Amino acid sequence: MPFTAANALADATLPELPNHYRGKVRDSYDLPDGRRIMIASDRLSAFDRVLAVIPHKGQVLTQMARYWFDHTADICPNHVLEYPDPNVVVGRRLTILPVEIVVRNYLAGTTGTSILTLYKQGQRDMYGHTFPDGLRDNQRLAQPIITPSSKAFDAGHDEPMTPDEILDQGLLTAAQWETVSAYALALFDRGQRMAAERGLILVDTKYEFGTDTDGRIVLADEIHTPDSSRYWIAETYEAKFAAGERPDSFDKDFVRSWVAARCDPYVDPIPEIPAAMIEETSKVYIRAFEAITGLPFEPPADEPVLDRVRRNLARYFA
């Protein structure tokens, strides 16, 4: 598979489409008829900022989300309408709920809001849950838990919340909280079971929900991808945990860890990530896609991704 600049999509700005919104990873366009075009770039985001551009990442995320949306449509409705390009999903435009739902089954993570980070700082009451003393890094919890956070828009920072705070602040109604919680736990259970069949552990994941024009709660964004989820290799987890070592994984934590070891990623400039690490990260995303879905990754043609996206979206131009 060629590893060239033509395989990387750093920016998905298309002046031919209206109402452009650039997120950390996706470029979105709102059409007048209520549809939204979402183009997954190859930007890699962590610590609330973009760290690098990883070839093939956007295609991996779009196609893996497609796999999971197809396999969870019986649990809750999702926003998908069609896939006109390997990097693009067209969906219903939703009003995104201001709460991000994170489900965790292990004491893990590297970000400032992860339960492992907070636990190591001495916190025992987090997100409405009380944790016992004596837990070890990457230890399995008694059961999956929801750790919600306020949904930061316009590049803000997500903030940890408890269910009571969500209700008291009117971010969600009691009925909405009950619905998204039930959806999230059911989706996570399906994801864990299917991952286990592939020899993987779905450690934690985040879900975003929105409401459609009828007020119905709909799953948005992506689901169970390496960007929104943490996966470990089941076969080696116990030995790694017993040795106090980091579990073998498919997620982007090794990039996060490399950056975090060299600066305060929330404050300092991000050091240039070596080209060899970028190439290896691309390979990790592809291996993750194939391991999680059981499907072969179809490499793109030797054509600039943005040119292909523009061609495939031409029918949406005004």
Image (cartoon, helix red, strand yellow):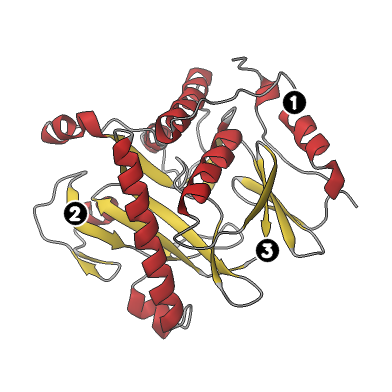
**Which class describes the residues within 10 Å of circle 2: few (<14), some (14-19), or many (20+)?**
few
Q: Secondary structure at mark 1?
A: loop
Residue 76, compared with residue 162, is above or below; it is above
The residue identified by callout 3 is 93
Q: Secondary structure at mark 3?
A: loop
The residue identified by callout 2 is 141
Residue, far front: 74
Name the amino acid type tagged 1: Pro
Viewer-nearest of labels 1 and 3? 3
Say whether disc 2 or disc 3 marks the residue closer to the N-terminus: 3
Residue 113 placement (x, y as % from top left): 36, 56
Residue 193 placement (x, y as % from top left): 31, 46
Name the amino acid type tagged 2: Leu
Residue drawn 59% across the image and 29% down it: 56
Say whether disc 1 or disc 2 marks the residue closer to the N-terminus: 2
Say whether disc 1 or disc 3 marks the residue closer to the N-terminus: 3
The residue identified by callout 1 is 304
Residue drawn 49% across the image and 29% down it: 295
Gap in Å between the C-alphas at discs 1 and 2?
45 Å
Residue 251 placement (x, y as % from top left): 40, 36
Residue 160 visible (yes or no): no
Residue 69 placement (x, y as % from top left): 52, 50
Residue, far top: 2
Gap in Å between the C-alphas at discs 1 and 3?
28 Å
